[in-house]
Amino acid sequence: MPHLTLITATFNSAKTLSDTIESILEQIENYPELAQNLEYIIIDGASTDDTIKIVERYQNSHQLNIRLISEPDHGIFDAMNKGIKLATGDIVGIINSDDFYHSPTVLQKVLKAFESNPTIDAIYGDLMYVQNDDITKQTRYWKAGEYREENLNWGWSIPHPTFFVARRVYEKLIEKDNRVFDTTTVISACYELTFRLLKIYKIKVKYLPEILVTMRDGGTSASSLSQRITGWREQRMVWKINHLPVPYFFITRRLMHKIWQFIKLHK
């Protein structure tokens, strides 16, 4: 079985972090072999709430090997970069502090998919959005679908919380680009990373056609109209910093793609 590293970036995440950690423990209960092959790294930005107390409580659990780093940082993508550099697993996944795995079998299926496809560089799946204050109410279903390079021109991207990547890929990125996540982008670093991996480095990816992660609404990119506008500008910038022309009507296409996700959910 491949060794897996999971990374969570936290900052004042006391309200939701227990759900994230419990969902990981649920994976171990379903797939006991995982316990000896899982490294969990939490990068905390010097939280002032009960985040650290929650982590310390779970550190006493013999089921979960948690490595905690708590210090000031330069935001979530800086924290993720720190975690990736510390990772020792063959496979690296990132689970946000207000997200959780959609079912108890997610990590088992991901690892078995890597085992069955040794030449694959990364695996991804679908993402479900729920209300921030009521996780039983679904708001959007991001059905990623099979990757085709031409779809990038239409605003397609991988739901990053579902993205599991071979560590060797990240090591090559650090060697060649001196970065994993581009911290010059405030909102769209996840998009930039998956874009660069797919469009520039042409990694081999496999799609698992099911929901892997549930995400609460209200992330940074969707918190206000001004944040959305900043995100759109950054997404156009991603093409430019990778020395590629921005496709015509690129933002319009991305918006239409998201609207279609809402329509399909509420049909």
Image (cartoon, rainbow, N blue to C red):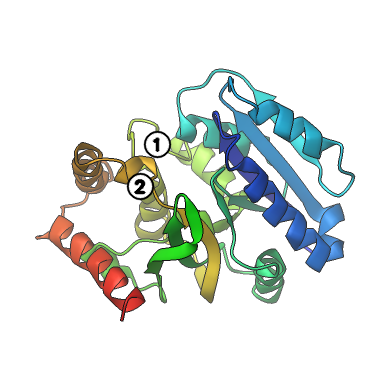
According to the image, label 1 marks what residue?
A: 182
Q: Residue at x 68, y 56 (%)?
A: 23
According to the image, label 2 marks what residue?
A: 192
Q: Taking 31 as reference, is 134 left or right?
A: left
Q: Give the SS element for disc 1.
A: loop
> In the displayed structure, would residue 201 be above or below residue 229?
below
Q: Nearer the viewer, residue 195 or 140?
A: 140
Instruction: Give the spatial CA distance, label 1 vs label 2.
Output: 7 Å
Badge 2, how many Cα within 10 Å: few under 14, some, many 20+? many
Q: Position of residue 215 (x, y in %)?
A: 48, 55
Q: Nearer the viewer, residue 114 or 45?
A: 45
Say which amino acid is labelled 1: Asp
> In the displayed structure, would residue 175 be above or below residue 6?
above
Q: Quadrant of residue 241?
A: top left
Q: Taking 247 as reference, is 88 left or right?
A: right
Mark closer to the chain start, 1 or 2: 1
Say which amino acid is labelled 2: Glu
The quarter of the picture where the C terminus appears is bottom left
> In the displayed structure, would residue 30 be above or below residue 175?
below
Q: Give the SS element for disc 2.
A: helix
> In the displayed structure, would residue 93 be above or below residue 78?
below
Q: Residue at x 47, y 50 (%)?
A: 133
Q: Is residue 177 visible?
A: yes
Q: Position of residue 244 (x, y in %)?
A: 21, 51
Q: Is residue 247 visible?
A: no
The single residue placed furthest to the bottom in the displayed view is: 267
Q: Residue at x 16, y 52 (%)?
A: 245
Q: Position of residue 62 (x, y in %)?
A: 90, 45
